[in-house]
Amino acid sequence: MIENKVAKSGLVTIDLEQFRERTEVVSFDLKDYLFMELILKEKDFREALENLNWSQFENKVIAVHCSTDAIIAHWAYMLVAAHANGFAKKVATGTPDEVKLRLMLENMRSHDWKQYDDKRVLLKGCSDEEMNPAVYAAATEELIPYATRLMYGEACSFVPVYRKKSPKPVSS
């Protein structure tokens, strides 16, 4: 009879993919609105935002950033957010990758990590898309108060990361 030692081990596997934002994150590059890719002219910018088809951002997350080395006034980000209101699910600053990471970390913070109390936990090592190391570091921080053991990788081949120390016996 073949025995499944992994199933019997009580090991709980967490796939961090579950924390990825499911809403599409789209780029809004302010560079496209700069004069000579250097200067943001308020009047021209306001006019461009007024004429933009904002319905293209319906239920999406807008990542507002500037891919050139221009100095952008804070009010420019505010104007984009104001115009996107009612269309976009959310407006965030940063490149799409930065925004995706920030949203993933927010999703992780709202997760109930207490369910892993006194469990042996394995953070799955392979994922469909490249996983930022910050995600693994954040998961580790969240799990350490609860998990008895924390590992990285796959059930058949993992790297031990953390083991809760047993309390020292009190001497009399």
Image (tube, rainbow, N blue to C red):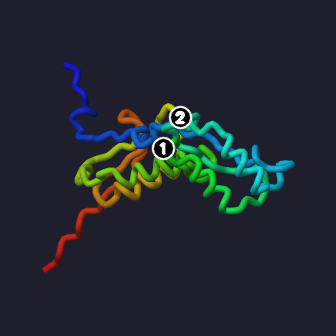
Q: Callout 2: few (<14), some (14-19), or many (20+) C-alpha neighbours within 10 Å? A: few
In which quarter of the view is residue 48 placed?
Answer: top right
In the image, residue 49 lies at what x, y percent? Answer: 67, 46
User: In the drawing, what numbered circle is on residue 166?
Assistant: none
**Would residue 102 appear left or right of 155 to someone viewing this image?**
right
Residue drawn at point x = 56 percent, y = 46 percent? 84
Residue 74 in the image: above or below residue 30: below
Which residue appears farthest toward the bottom when viewing the image? 172
- Report which residue position mark 2 lands on: 129
User: In the drawing, what numbered circle is on residue 89?
Assistant: 1
Residue drawn at point x = 23 percent, y = 53 percent? 118
Q: Callout 1: few (<14), some (14-19), or many (20+) C-alpha neighbours within 10 Å? A: some
In which quarter of the view is residue 62 placed?
Answer: top right
Q: Secondary structure beneath disc 1?
A: loop
CA gap between label 1 and label 2 equals: 23 Å
For the residue pair 20 and 165, the one nearer the viewer reads as 20
**Would residue 6 appear left or right of 15 to someone viewing this image?**
left
Image quarter where the C terminus lies is bottom left
For the residue pair 41 and 139, the one nearer the viewer reads as 41
